[in-house]
């Protein structure tokens, strides 16, 4: 915006006051989503319902002043193909107006059965968009014994997100970095997440949804009104930093 040369002092003051108001209003509009209500549907399996990731993410978002409504369609070991053929996930997509629908595929299927993964991920993406919601792919992590699987998982999730015009929460990539600095994110089976792993997933999803740093988030989780054991504030801070570093790459 160019300031007219002929303005006198009073006019300049009025002009700058007007400009300040415009900037203030624009900032308020940009900040508005943080106080809005988010409606999120989760479709997946035990990597989603383990440690109640939907509730964990809701706590993180609520801690930043957002209202959250969520539902889940999760079945142990389920693939997106199974969810599609079963029909319950499709019904849930159209049950109400969602902002995001989180899609989580079975742990190795994005690279072990890539064609099937892409086929049903595309079908779900089309269904979600038809319902005026946004698909969000939940990139999972490699098994503890097979860390070399992570690049294959990441490539498949990023490729399907690009092909469908969706977003991806790169949880698996943050998971890899956290493991490299000595964080133990697995339960005894070496596949499923412990509370630290699920907290990291929540941090990455928070960043994906809001574009804001995870370092702003609460570092204590609660269950039934009491602090939830299994996650210290120091561990939470480290995981937040891992999430931030991943999102900045």
Image (cartoon, grey):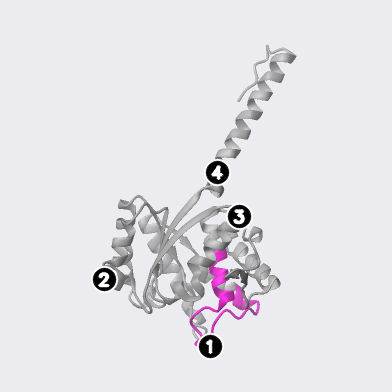
Q: Which is in the foreground here, disc 3 or disc 1?
A: 3
Q: Who comes first in sequence, dot 3 or dot 2?
A: 3
Q: Who comes first in sequence, dot 3 or dot 1?
A: 3
Q: Residue furthest front?
A: 225
**Circle 4 residues within 10 Å: few <14, some 14–19, many ≥20:** few
Location of residue 9 (image quadrant):
top right
What is the quadrant of the C terminus in the image?
A: bottom right
Q: CA distance from mark 3 to mark 2?
A: 36 Å
Q: To which residue does mark 2 refer?
A: 86
Q: Secondary structure at mark 4?
A: helix
Q: Who comes first in sequence, dot 4 or dot 2?
A: 4
Residue 28: give x, y in percent of width and height: 59, 39
Q: To which residue does mark 4 refer?
A: 32
Q: Which residue is located at x 71 percent, y 72 percent?
A: 234
Q: Who comes first in sequence, dot 1 or dot 4?
A: 4
Instruction: Assess whether mark 3 and mark 4 are in contact (beta carbons under 8 angstroms).
Output: no
Instruction: Assess whether mark 2 and mark 3 are in contact (beta carbons under 8 angstroms).
Output: no
Q: Which residue is located at x 67 percent, y 70 percent?
A: 238
Q: Residue 185 lies in magenta, yes or no?
A: yes
Q: CA distance from mark 4 to mark 2?
A: 37 Å
Q: CA distance from mark 3 to mark 1?
A: 33 Å
Which residues are the magenta region?
178-204
Q: To which residue does mark 1 refer?
A: 188
């Amino acid at each position: 915006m160019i300031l007219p040369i002929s303005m006198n002092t009073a006019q300049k003051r009025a002009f700058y006051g007007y400009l300040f108001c415009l900037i203030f209003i624009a900032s308020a509009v940009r900040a508005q989503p943080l106080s809005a209500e988010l409606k999120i549907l989760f479709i997946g399996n035990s990597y989603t319902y383990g440690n109640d990731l939907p509730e964990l993410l809701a706590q993180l978002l609520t801690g930043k002043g957002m209202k959250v409504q969520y539902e889940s369609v999760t079945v142990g070991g389920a693939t997106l193909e199974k969810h599609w053929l079963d029909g319950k996930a499709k019904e849930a997509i159209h049950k109400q107006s969602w902002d995001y629908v989180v899609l989580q595929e079975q742990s190795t299927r994005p690279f072990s059965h890539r064609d099937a993964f892409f086929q049903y991920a595309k079908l779900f993406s089309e269904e979600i968009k038809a319902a005026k919601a946004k698909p969000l792919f939940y990139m999972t992590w490699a098994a503890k014994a097979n860390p070399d699987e992570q690049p294959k998982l990441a490539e498949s999730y990023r490729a399907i997100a690009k092909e469908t015009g969706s977003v991806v929460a790169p949880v698996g990539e943050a998971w890899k970095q956290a493991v490299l600095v000595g964080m133990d994110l697995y339960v005894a089976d070496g596949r499923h997440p412990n509370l630290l792993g699920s907290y990291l997933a929540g941090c990455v999803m928070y960043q994906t949804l809001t574009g804001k740093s995870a370092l702003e988030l609460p570092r204590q989780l609660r269950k039934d009104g009491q602090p939830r054991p299994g996650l210290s504030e120091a561990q939470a801070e480290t995981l937040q930093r891992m999430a931030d570093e991943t999102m900045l790459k």
